[in-house]
Amino acid sequence: MLLSFGYVTCLLLYLPFTQAALTITGPEGPIQAKPGSDVLLPCHFEDSSGPIDPKRLAMIWRMGSRDIAKYEDKLEVFHPRAKMSSEELLRGNASILLQNVQGADGSTYTCSVIHSPDKEEKSIELKVEENFLLPEWGV
């Protein structure tokens, strides 16, 4: 649309606001775990434009900068105590289970999902409680 006001000409462009079809959800705060426990890091995604197409899907879980799992045509898990389900992934559940959590597992984890052409990611902080003993007070 072209509008003229005296010497000033304004060109108004109509650019429709588009929202990404892919949304990803997970916890807002940190997840607490005790050493030796199993902990689920939740990551769920949905594409409002339609069902999940495996040919358009890629996913990666990172612990800091280290890859711990990825999906590109097939699921690969690199962390020896991590478990994921490719069937659940194709239903929009990219959650990962860490078994026998250790202090060194405490970190920021990032779940990144691509359902082409959209990409979203969610970071989750895992805090591993250290074992400590309370002093015994005599009465």
Image (cartoon, rainbow, N blue to C red):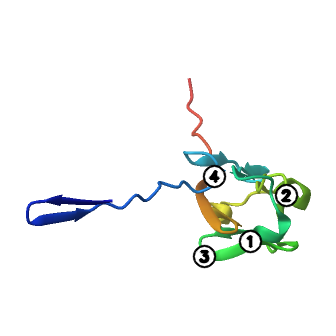
Label 2, residues with CA under 10 Å away: few <14, some 14-19, many ≥20: some
The structure residue drawn at horizontal position 66% and vertical position 76%, both measured from the top left corner, is 66
Position in image of residue 131 (x %, y %): 65, 50
Badge 1 local density, few (<14 within 10 Å), some, or many (20+)? many
Residue shown at 62%/65% (left/top)? 119
Which residue is disc 1 drawn over? 68
Would you identify the image quadrant in which residue 22 lies? bottom right
Whichever of labels 2 and 3 marks the residue nearer the N terminus, that label is: 3
> Mark 2 belongs to which amino acid?
Leu
Residue bearing the label numbered 2:
90
Q: Residue at x 75, y 57 (%)?
A: 101
Which residue does the numbered mark 3 point to in the structure image?
65
Kindly tell me whether residue 43 is visible in this rendering. no
Crowd rating for badge 3 (residues with CA inside 10 Å; few <14, some 14–19, many 20+): few
Question: What kind of element bears circle 4?
Answer: strand
Q: Amino acid under label 4?
A: Thr
Q: Residues within 10 Å of mark 4 (few under 14, many from 20)?
A: some
Say whether disc 1 or disc 4 marks the residue closer to the N-terminus: 4
Circles 4, 3 touching at the beta carbon (< 8 Å): no
Picture disc at residue 23? 4
Looking at the image, which residue is at 86% across and 53% down? 88
- At mark 3, the secondary structure is loop
Label 1 amino acid? Ile
Which marked residue is nearer to the observer: mark 1 or mark 4? 4
